[in-house]
Image: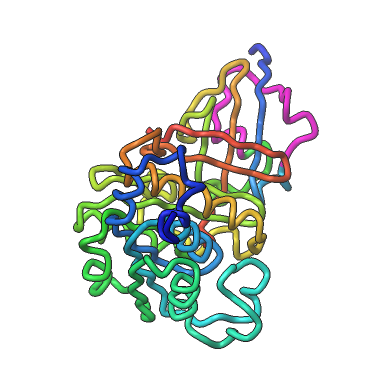
Amino acid sequence: MSENSERYARNFDTLTWLEQDRLASAKVSVLGLGGLGGGVCEMLARIGVGHLTLIDGDVFEASNLNRQLLCTEALVGTSKAKAAEERIRAVNSLVQVTPVAVYADKATLFDMITGSDLVVDCLDSIHGRFMLQDAARKAQIPVVGGAIAGVSGQVTVIFPEDKGYELIYGKRDHLPARGVESHTGNISYCALMVAAVQASECIKLLLGRGDVLQNKMLIMELWSNSFEIMDLV
Amino acid sequence: MAEIKIEIKLFVTLTAFAPKNADNFPVQEGTTVEMLIRDLNIPADTVKLIFVNGRKQDTTYVLTSGDRLGLFPPVGGG
């Protein structure tokens, strides 16, 4: 067995070879490379998603060390996008990585994500999430959104025709800048649990397989071990 | 008016407002979610999402016996 087929040997028979090939030609953008994005991009690279655009203008701070997989002590003060690129190249050199080490804004985001099959929302700002939803709608691609606070997390999938974040956060003219995570912080295992669910939703969307959380939200709360799918419409 | 029992689950920062008997909480028939939020002393602007029996509702929803009510603050971290 060649190294490349051995690399994916443990994906079978959960995946078929045809599905593995589809993942190899798939293009995913990840916006935000912190607690969620660091986990999502690693999982997508390991399963074999062939093209990753990794977007974040931020640099690591010491406060990221408690949960962000890409953050090490040596990397504090350095680019998150650059760290993600190096990590993905080290994990799976078959993946074509495009790091984007600038903050996305309304004017630039569409160009960054257009051409992708989907975009993963790993942002930490509610306003930013709406901006991403707008850009994804224009690009006609789905958003896989995840958000965390403390040991609680939520995941949803938004297609271009959906109301999306308005159903979760309300009208955009009455949005708080941040959610309650500004009080609770974010715990490592919760971030990675939500990242794992986001990665799973990505794979299902790319393969057209399984149930996705369109107009639904999976809510997870780890003090009480609550996992529940809520209907948003 | 008759008394009915509902189940209340509060999430993240709202857990601070959870009543002792949240699993079997008595309310008067005709009580809306808005009235209950006020009775529990939860600041109205801290509740972002309301689910009853797994479906999104708004504050005007009239509670009925056996309802499972979930209240969520805005969660936006990444």
Seen at 52% across and 86% down, the residue is A78
* Rendered-image quadrant of the N terminus of chain A: bottom left
Residue in the foreground of this view, choosing between A77 and A185: A77
Residue in the foreground of this view, choosing between A225 and B12: A225
Drawn side of residue A52 relative to residue A66, left or right: left
* Colour scheme of the rendered structure: rainbow
For the question of whether residue A173 can be seen, the reply is: no
* Rendered-image quadrant of the C terminus of chain A: top left
- x and y percentages locating residue B9 in the rendered image: 66, 35
Q: Is residue B69 above or below residue A195?
A: above
Residue A136's quadrant in the figure? Answer: bottom left
Magenta stretch: residue A138 in it?
Answer: no
Residue A106's quadrant in the figure? Answer: bottom left
In the displayed image of the protein, which residue is found farthest to the right?
B20
Residue in the foreground of this view, choosing between A153 and A141: A141
- x and y percentages locating residue A227 in the rendered image: 60, 37
Q: Is residue A154 above or below residue B76?
A: above
For the question of whether residue A58 can be seen, the reply is: yes
Residue A134's quadrant in the figure? Answer: bottom left
Seen at 44% across and 81% down, the residue is A82
The residue segment tinted magenta is B18-37
Q: Is residue A190 above or below residue A32?
A: above
Drawn side of residue B27 relative to residue A203, left or right: right
Seen at 30% across and 54% down, the residue is A118
- x and y percentages locating residue A224 in the rendered image: 72, 39
In the displayed image of the protein, which residue is found farthest to the front?
A1
- x and y percentages locating residue A10 in the rendered image: 51, 47
How many discs appear? 0
